[in-house]
């Protein structure tokens, strides 16, 4: 009896291993979870830096052929950016060079429901390896911006070094706990590209997302786009 159970278990594992690869005309589902390393791309300045978050969801795939699959997913995704930067502004008033220096630190936490639509190409000589690319729609779930800005001014110099004589906004602290329309736009759009490797149904997936839409709703925050690297593990179940 034990031998029969063991043999049945071995045959089941072998069949699952054979089915792990993409097959023409088959449907599969993959629960997946992992890590995001996200930021906002800036056309000007260097205020936004990477922050980590989690991602999790489901992806469905249809096998067009042994080498091509079409997939659509629904993923919860923590994105945003660490904010850390400074600016200097010079103005001249009655022949005096007036310097205003500002430092800003904080964090933007933005959560999305992402829907990626991908073409997966399985490389025949390298069993289990696939490259993928497609488009992705992001629906903002919620966000919060929390930052602190300190601004100082100087209108005197000593040995060509500015002497700060007044503090305009000493450690003024801004906290946003509002609807996403006050910080981020409700819809994001872009394209992901990536690689994956699958062994016996277990898949390691790495993707990079290039956002095309402006991420922030503020009129003076144009050309700031979502960017993130996503690394996930999943398991393929054939339906």
Image (tube, rainbow, N blue to C red):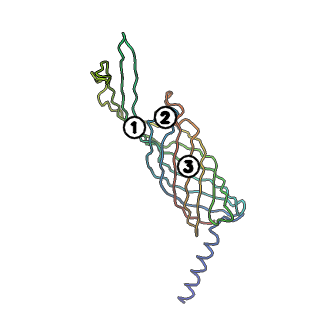
* Residue depicted at x 29% and y 22%: 159
Q: In the rendered view, does 196 fall on the left or right side of 51?
A: right
| Mark in front: 3 vs 2 | 3
In this rendered view, identify the residue nearer to me: 103 or 155: 155
Residue drawn 55% across the image and 84% down it: 6
Give the answer, above or below, for where 180 lies relative to 152: below
Q: Secondary structure at mark 3?
A: strand
Q: Name the residue at the front extreme.
A: 159
- Real-space Cα distance between discs 3 and 1? 23 Å
Most extreme residue toward the top, as rendered?
A: 94
Q: Quadrant of residue 103?
A: top left
Residue 84: give its label: 1
Residue tagged 2: 181
Between discs 3 and 1, the one toward the N terminus: 1
**Residue 115 coordinates in the image, percent (x, y):** 58, 48
Quadrant of the frame with the C terminus: bottom right
Give the label, 1 or 2, closer to the camera: 1
Task: Tell me the crowding category of disc 1: few under 14, some 14 to 19, or many 20 or more residues within 10 angstroms, Cα based.
Answer: some
In this view of the protein, which residue sits in the foreground, 135 or 101?
A: 101
Tell me: 58 left or right of 26: left
Q: Position of residue 27 (x, y in %)?
A: 66, 62
Mark pair 3, 2: CA separation: 25 Å
Quadrant for residue 154, please give it: top left
Marks 1 and 2 close (CB-CB < 8 Å): no
Residue 217 picture location, percent across and down: 50, 32
Q: Secondary structure at mark 1?
A: strand
User: Label 3: how many residues lie within 10 Å, few (<14), some (14-19) or many (20+)?
Assistant: some
First in residue order: circle 3 vs circle 2: 2
Distance Cα–Cα, label 1 vs label 2: 23 Å
Q: Does 170 sit left or right of 199 as displayed?
A: left
Residue for badge 3: 208
């Amino acid at each position: 009896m034990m031998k029969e159970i063991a043999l049945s278990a071995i045959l089941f594992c072998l069949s699952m291993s054979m089915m792990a690869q993409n097959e023409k005309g088959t449907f599969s589902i993959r629960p997946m979870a992992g890590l995001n390393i996200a930021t906002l791309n800036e056309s000007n300045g260097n205020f936004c830096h990477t922050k980590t978050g989690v991602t999790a969801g489901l992806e469905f795939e249809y096998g067009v052929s042994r080498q091509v699959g079409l997939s659509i997913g629904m993923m919860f995704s923590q994105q945003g950016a660490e904010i850390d930067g400074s600016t200097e502004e010079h103005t001249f008033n009655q022949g005096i060079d007036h310097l205003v220096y500002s430092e800003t630190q904080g964090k933007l936490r933005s959560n999305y429901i992402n829907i990626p639509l991908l073409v997966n190409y399985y490389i025949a000589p390298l069993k289990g390896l696939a490259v993928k690319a497609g488009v992705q729609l992001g629906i903002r779930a919620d966000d919060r911006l929390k930052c602190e800005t300190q601004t100082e001014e100087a209108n005197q110099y000593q040995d060509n070094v500015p002497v700060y004589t007044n503090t305009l906004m000493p450690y003024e602290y801004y906290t946003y706990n509002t609807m996403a329309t006050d910080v981020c736009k409700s819809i994001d759009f872009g394209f992901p590209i990536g690689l994956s490797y699958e062994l016996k149904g277990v898949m390691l997936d790495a993707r990079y997302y290039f956002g095309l839409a402006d991420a922030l709703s503020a009129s003076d925050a144009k050309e700031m786009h979502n960017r993130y690297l996503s690394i996930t593990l999943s398991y393929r179940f054939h339906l």
